[in-house]
Amino acid sequence: MRIEIISTGDEIVTGLVVDTNAAWLSALLLEQGWQVRRRLTVGDNLADLKTVLQESANRAEVVLVCGGLGPTADDLTAQAAAEAFDQPLTLFPDWLATIEARYASRGRPMAQSNAKQAWLPQGSEILDNPVGTACGFVVRSGQSQLFFTPGVPFEFKQMVREQILPRLKQLAGAQIDTELRRFYTFGVSESALSDMLDAEPWPAGIELGYRSSMPLIELKLIGHGASTADM
């Protein structure tokens, strides 16, 4: 299952905010046996967003898009998805009622701009956000399913665990693309370790990866469809 991650926001591409969401998501998916093939970052530009969404949808079976679902003018992800996949923005009245109810429960009036968060691409499936006003949604395009989430980390992580992982497991079935095992070595340099191991006759589908984190060297044994015996 080919997976790509798209992170959106000028604050990320300018370096004002570190993209911890994508790193967390990549590691979580690898634990499940799915190695992310590409991670892309794009600013708050409608044309750029549309292009990146279309390109990823043409390559990947699953695209995970984080950010740009807020109520302000620079939150363009829903509009970009609607235009990229010819699914016009449509009011989802049930989600609008949810936003209004959440504000009412706090004794606060809902800002008019929040209504924007209930306008989603026509035909999309809502992903519930139990702690915020921006719901996620799923858009299907050809072979690809695109999952959209807000970028607020505690909202994003809860939605991934509760809404997205179960859907990905259903998509993948029993298929495990990647298995990862980590070993930590001490007293041998990264290059010396590579000299000792790289030329060995490893089974098909198994790769080695190295990461220096002095004083340790991490050795990654990565199996792509490899059997338990081979691992």
Image: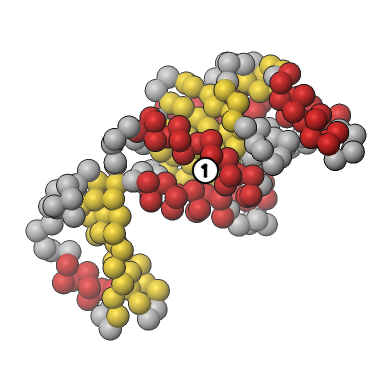
Observer-nearest residue: 204 or 153?
153
Report the number of numbered marks: 1
Q: Dot 1: within a 10 Å radius of its alpha carbon, few (fewer than 14), some, or many (20 or more) residues?
A: few
Above or below, comparing residue 6 to residue 145 in the picture: below
Above or below, comparing residue 76 to residue 219 in the picture: above
Where in the figure is residue 105, as x and y percent of width and height? 83, 36
Q: Is residue 114 left or right of residue 50?
A: right
The residue located at (13%, 57%) in the rendering is: 202
Observer-nearest residue: 43 or 60?
60
Mark 1, residue position = 161
Where in the figure is residue 16, as x and y percent of width and height? 67, 57
Decide if residue 43 is in sight here. Answer: no
How did the renderer colour the structure? secondary structure
Q: Is residue 1 left or right of residue 118?
A: left
The residue located at (62%, 16%) in the rendering is: 122
Amino acid type of disc 1?
A: Arg
Label 1 secondary element: helix
Q: Is residue 164 left or right of residue 203?
A: right
Where in the figure is residue 163, as x and y percent of width and height? 53, 35
Decide if residue 23 is in sight here. Answer: yes
Above or below, comparing residue 183 to residue 124 in the picture: below
